[in-house]
Image (spheres, rainbow, N blue to C red):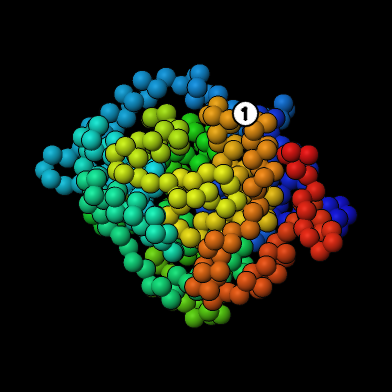
Amino acid sequence: MSSSTKTFYNLPEEVIFCKRCVMSNQRPASIPETSHKRERANATYMNLNNDNICDACLHSEIKDFKIDWKSREESLLILLDKHRKNNGEYDCIVPGSGGKDSVFQSHILKYKYGMNPLTITWPPILYTDYGYKNFKNWLESGFDNISFTRNPKIMKKLTKLAIENLLHPFQTFILGQKNLAPKIATQMNIPLIFYGENEAEYGNPIADNLSSLRDKSYYTYKNLDNMFIAGLSFKELKEKHSLSLNDLMPYLPLYIDQNSRSNIEIHYLGYYLKWTPQEAYYYAVENSNFRARPFRTQGTYSKYNSIDDKIDDLHYFTTFVKFGLGRASYDASQEIRNKHISREEGKILVKKYDGEYPKKYIFETLEYLGISEDYFNKLCDTFRSPHLWNKINNEWHLKKKVFS
């Protein structure tokens, strides 16, 4: 392989776009965050079949034509009846920060199915004003909530390290959001946890959708020596960055022995109920006064998805740098699968918005984390895989685009 075609992160050398949506085979499949290292040696990416149709589009077809949703709901009722409590105690946990999905999950579980959910929140790194209002509106629609305030000094340090080592500004939030619920479930003896749709609906292996349960590898660990945060081992974090186990504990998964004793089950509600993001948005507007962003999100055309954290925009910019796929690619692909726009419309939206520099919040976010904009931009250049990017007249250009 020549240097001009060298790939980073174990990415596929040839860029191939799905023929139905605007996603490419460069989209990373989910891996446990605590195994995430820069080289991503064990990573997998969006699978395309022999007709160049991606797994997410194939699953969308299955959702529309092959799943008996009435039967799935009946299975949900059996699960809920198994865990339902009538003694005043909580019988399930719904993690979230007041976005459309957590509103939909918690509200429908409580008001349609008669459950008693406890909502829990790992707060955004930097709330947007409208994101915080949506969080408050969510709780005021009828929910108890535990919001975890982590050590800001440690959170900033780990987020900065994740940017420097992985160009992954969202990692500390993902770690907290995914790992807080099992810990609280263990402490409070509430073994049933619900997340929204399975990540497999958007590009993980299609077989992941065959079960309602989240794989335990995503929220448990056996050996601390095998855990990585910000791409660094526990030993490196301790010796080079003076971080103790107590400092790191909020970000770590649940120890597997604790999980075995507590019999926690983490289910995807989207396995039982047909999940459509736009419908979740309309439901949240109607039932919790959820409000979209008052302006278009930079990097895309939408206003209501992932809007509670100022670092979200930065995160999607970094996915564009690393994988050639920005926020518009993700949004348009999802809307194409739901038949809300055509592929041609999606290509136009990607051409217009994908990779847009996130000026609205980047200066505030980087200043909060103690990173200069110049340093960040130079850092981005070191994460651009040569098989994706060309530099022409001092500007970076993707070698292959869905619209060219």
In the rendered view, tell whether residue 160 sits above or below residue 285.
Answer: below
Residue lying at the far front in this picture: please name it: 294
Count of labels in the image: 1
In the rendered view, tell whether residue 103 sits above or below residue 79.
Answer: below
Q: Residues within 10 Å of mark 1 (few under 14, many from 20)?
A: some
Residue at 64% over, 33% down:
345
Q: Is residue 350 visible?
A: yes
Residue lying at the far right in this picture: please name it: 2
The answer to which quarter of the image holds residue 91 is top left
Element type at marker 1? Answer: loop
Residue at 21% over, 42% down:
116
Which image quadrant: the C terminus? top right
Residue at 57% over, 44% down:
301
Q: Position of residue 254 (x, y in %)?
A: 39, 57
For the residue pair 150 and 75, the one nearer the viewer reads as 150
Question: Please, what is the three-letter code of the amino acid marked with disc 1?
Answer: Ser
* 208 displayed left or right of 321: left
Q: Is residue 257 visible?
A: no
Residue lying at the far left in this picture: please name it: 87
In the rendered view, tell whether residue 379 sits above or below residue 316.
Answer: below
For the residue pair 8 and 121, the one nearer the viewer reads as 121
Q: Position of residue 110 (x, y in %)?
A: 24, 38
Q: Position of residue 34 (x, y in %)?
A: 52, 59
* 142 displayed left or right of 205: left
Q: Position of residue 168 (x, y in %)?
A: 58, 61
For the residue pair 290 and 70, the one nearer the viewer reads as 290
Residue for badge 1: 342
For the residue pair 207 and 399, the one nearer the viewer reads as 399
Residue at 54% over, 29% down:
340
